[in-house]
Amino acid sequence: IKLTWDDKSDGEDGFIIDKKIDDNEWQEPYILLGANSEEWTDTNIVPLSVYEYRISAYLDIYESESLTLSYYNVFPSPSELKFKKLSNNQLELTWDDNSNGEEGYKIDRSVNMGSWEEEIVTLGEDSKLWTDANFSVTNDYSYRVYAYYQNLNSAQIVANVITGCTSQRAFNYNSEANLDDGSCDFIINVPSDYSKIQDAINASTDGDTILVEKGTYVENLNYNGKNIVLLSGHYSTGDRSYITETIIDGFQSGSVVTFSNSETTSSVLEGFTLRNGYSESGGGIYILDATPTLRHLIIDGNIAGGYEAGAGIYFSYRDRTLRLENVVISNNESTNSVGNGGGILVNRGSLALKNSLIIGNKAWDGGGVNISGYGIYGNDNTIENVTIVNNEGYRSGISSTGELSVRNSIIWFNGGSIPIKMDDGSTILYSNLYAEYVGGGNISADPLLDTSTYRLQAGSPSIDAGDPDSQYNDTDGTRNDMGAYGGPLGDWNK
């Protein structure tokens, strides 16, 4: 405790200070100071005691009137407790040290509102900083910091650390979070933020979402290795008009959309019509060494003019699988005389195709007038609840150079002399085929498809004719309907 006063005497011998602790007797004199003194520090104190001091000037045996001061030595708590993320696994705490003479500081911690872990660390006197190396950005924390002296503790100061996205611009903004965990996902709107979709892609970072309003966008898009989500309003509404009216037109200037920089399944394209693309391979979508997520798309009227082709979609990624759900691939054409895959070409990879329509695609193979392309071309494919009709080519419906598994599908009205080409070990089950194929549950009867939507009309032999196993049931719980609109991913938002 530091005492200060004004020296109003002249010629004094010095100053006398008496001291009293709590209800004890006065210690008089406690200390004698020299002439002209105006301050003194008492270092012999303990917390939580009352100290009284009397100060007087003296000359020989004479004393002036005394000045009395009482002081309760409260053990002050630290203040201004702050935190800072050093990394996803380290959090730094800082505070103001308001105590004198404390032995040190102690810190308690609680994780995710659980019970307190008391005295997880004990620090020395005058400490103002500590780093929690057992921190994880995926959890919330509370910390209590307090000074201590022997068996006495000061009052505590508490900090609550709530992790989450702290940016109000992000769609996953957490208004309660006070420490950003790096999880912010931002929504970029087209055309309000950027008039062109590619400009929005260029401005985005991994985890962002780009939401595109209805309209026609004449562009050739490249994800450029970004794991972002590109959506139309179909995602939030289920309204298929957003798919038909949110159009990306390639203007025959290249593939409409390109994935060729190691994009992962976190790269999503959903809810668009892709049309009028032209490229050597992949007029609609070109995929090289990437595995994007493609859903609820119409890929229509695209051209591939190269040797490999794949007018609708070209996919090449060794030992990886292209997964497609609820897509319409229609009226695409491989124009090269040896081009493959009017609808889809899978090269050095596999195809998992569910609940999709492959309609009216063309490809050429051989010389001159020989039609030798297919609706789907690839190896080691699985096809489930898919309608493949009106495709033209030598092997017009499906050609697979590896094992092929077809289930609950309709393959009908495809031109050419070989509607289905598959290797030994392939299976076709519970499907409606233009020609009879060996396999459990297969039929060969006009599926009675609606000419505009390709849904099954009343009386179709393909209704409730798919695999009876309940895992394949339609969305209403009834037995699987063959074709694109049956099964768990069926219905397609009628």
Image (tube, helix red, strand yellow):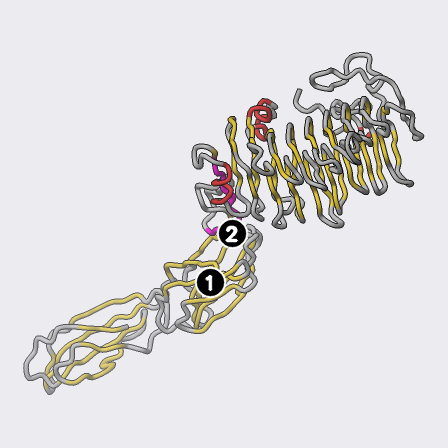
Residue at figure coordinates x 80%, y 39% from the top left: 381
Residue 76 appears in the picture as rendered = yes
Amino acid identity at mark 1: Glu
Q: Which residue occupies the extreme left position in the image?
A: 10
Secondary structure beneath label 2: loop
Taking depth in this image into account, of 349 and 82 the one nearest to the observer is 349
Residue at figure coordinates x 55%, y 50% from the top left: 113
Q: Is residue 49 left or right of residue 357?
A: left
Q: Is residue 141 left or right of residue 393?
A: left
Q: Quadrant of the N terminus?
A: bottom left
Packing grade of label 2 (10 A; few <14, some 14-19, many >=20) is some
Q: Which mark is residue 92?
A: 1
Q: Nearer the viewer, mark 2 or mark 1?
A: 2
Q: Is residue 484 left or right of residue 56?
A: right
Residue 28 part of the magenta segment:
no
Secondary structure beneath label 1: strand
Residue at the disc numbered 2: 181
Q: Which residue occupies the extreme front position in the image?
A: 368
Taking depth in this image into account, of 464 and 198 the one nearest to the observer is 198
Taking depth in this image into account, of 408 and 249 the one nearest to the observer is 249
The residue segment tinted magenta is 179-189
Q: Is residue 138 left or right of residue 388?
A: left
Q: Quadrant of the C terminus?
A: top right
Amino acid identity at mark 2: Asp
Residue 423 higher or lower than 154, as above or below = above
Residue at figure coordinates x 63%, y 38% from the top left: 279
